[in-house]
Amino acid sequence: MVTPPTVVTDGGVEKVNDSVESLIKTGLFKRVLALKEVTFSNWMIEARWRALKYQWLYLHPLESYASVRRLVAFYVQACNT
């Protein structure tokens, strides 16, 4: 028997509803609700990405891949020093 893949989601209505429940009952995958059925969290990295986006990147013009790369490199260097 093949073990179905596990999908970790939050409890949003787009992921917890009758349609999704009926799909889960088919056995194609298993859903695990984050912060309810998971004993670990990635909140620290999520907080870092959120700060990078809202407190740094979105304050600057993102005109090219090179400018985004430069801004991210500066932010990571500043956080690490």
Image (cartoon, rainbow, N blue to C red):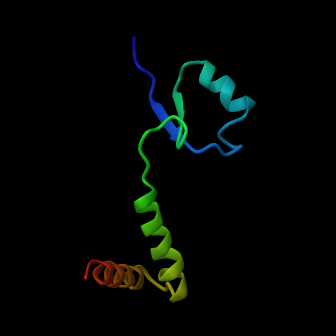
- Using the image as rendered, state which of residue 63 and residue 43 is in the foreground: 43
Q: Residue at x 42, y 68 (%)?
A: 48
Image coordinates of residue 25 in percent, x first then y, are: 62, 19
Which of the 4 quarters of the picture holds residue 71?
A: bottom left
Q: Quadrant of the N terminus?
A: top left
Q: Foreground: 44 or 49?
A: 44
Q: Residue furthest bottom?
A: 60
Q: Is residue 62 above or below residue 4?
A: below
Q: Is residue 52 left or right of residue 79?
A: right
Q: Residue at x 49, y 86 (%)?
A: 63
Residue under the point 41% across and 60% down: 44
Q: Quadrant of residue 24?
A: top right
- Residue at 64% x, 25% y is 23
Rendered location of residue 55, percent (x, y) = 51, 81
Residue 9 percent location from the top left of the image: 55, 42
Q: Quadrant of the C terminus?
A: bottom left
Which residue is outermost to the left? Answer: 81
Q: Residue furthest top?
A: 1
- Image height of 76 relative to 24, above or below: below
